[in-house]
């Protein structure tokens, strides 16, 4: 009987410890989850170049020659878009999202991550 009690007393703190570990699990999961999300969001111009394959039907990236749409070579080195808006992440992104005048809207065709990578690639042109 005495032995049993001792056993119980011995196990109690151990149980508490394992519970403490469990309670930390969600925090660990969130921490790693966020790190993974941050890594996924780091802009990758190489991936953006693959996505640009869809745009290359209508846009040149290496020559100034116009295709269906204007060349995007040096886009981010220009002061303004054809619309007169300043060349910036937000204005280029909204141009890609909305499309118009012969360009399809990419709002729902590309994920946010794909658009981030695409912008990173456009900046290298
Ligand atoms: C079917 C042809 C077509 C495709 C595909 C296309 N575009 Fe366009 N894009 C156009 C046309 C045409 C214009 C010019 C529209 C105008 O004059 O307002 C344009 C304009 C633009 C502009 C504005 C350029 C400027 O100097 O103002 C950007 C930026 C752009 N496109 C990016 C993209 C990206 C990025 C993709 C791929 C995700 C893409 N386009 C796919 C036809 C296309």
Image: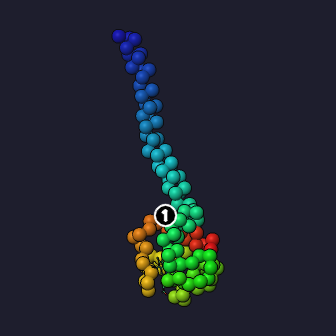
| 119 is higher (above) or lower (below) than 65 | above
Which residue appears at 58% of the width and 69% of the height? 121
Quarter of the rendering occupied by the N terminus: top left
| 87 is higher (above) or lower (below) than 40 | below
In depth, the one of 88 and 74 nearer the eye is: 74
**Quick check: can you spot residue 45?**
yes
Q: Residues within 10 Å of mark 1 (few under 14, many from 20)?
A: some
What percent of the width, then of the height, locates residue 41?
A: 52, 60
Q: Is mark 1 on a helix, strand or loop?
A: helix
In-image side of 106 versus 61 (left or right): left
In depth, the one of 77 and 72 nearer the eye is: 72
The residue where tag 1 is placed is 113
Q: How is the image coloured?
A: rainbow
Quarter assignment of residue 6: top left
Which residue appears at 51% of the width and 69% of the height? 53
Q: Please state the total of marks drawn on the protein image.
A: 1
What percent of the width, then of the height, locates residue 47?
A: 54, 62
Which residue appears at 39% of the width and 20% of the height? 8
**Quick check: can you spot residue 90?**
no
| 85 is higher (above) or lower (below) than 4 | below
In depth, the one of 24 and 98 nearer the eye is: 98
Which residue appears at 52% of the width and 88% of the height? 83
What percent of the width, then of the height, locates residue 100?
A: 43, 83
Quarter of the rendering occupied by the C terminus: bottom right
| 102 is higher (above) or lower (below) than 89 | below
């Amino acid at each position: 009987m005495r032995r049993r009690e001792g056993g119980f007393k011995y196990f109690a703190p151990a149980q508490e410890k394992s519970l403490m570990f469990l309670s930390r699990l969600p925090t660990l999961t969130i921490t790693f989850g966020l790190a993974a999300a941050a890594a996924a969001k780091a802009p990758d111009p190489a991936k953006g170049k693959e996505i640009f394959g869809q745009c290359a039907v209508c846009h040149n990236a290496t020559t100034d020659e116009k295709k269906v749409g204007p060349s995007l070579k040096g886009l981010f080195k220009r002061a303004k878009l054809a619309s007169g808006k300043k060349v910036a992440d937000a204005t280029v992104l909204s141009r890609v999202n909305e499309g118009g005048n012969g360009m399809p809207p990419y709002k729902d065709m590309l994920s946010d991550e794909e658009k981030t990578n695409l912008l990173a690639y456009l900046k290298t042109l």
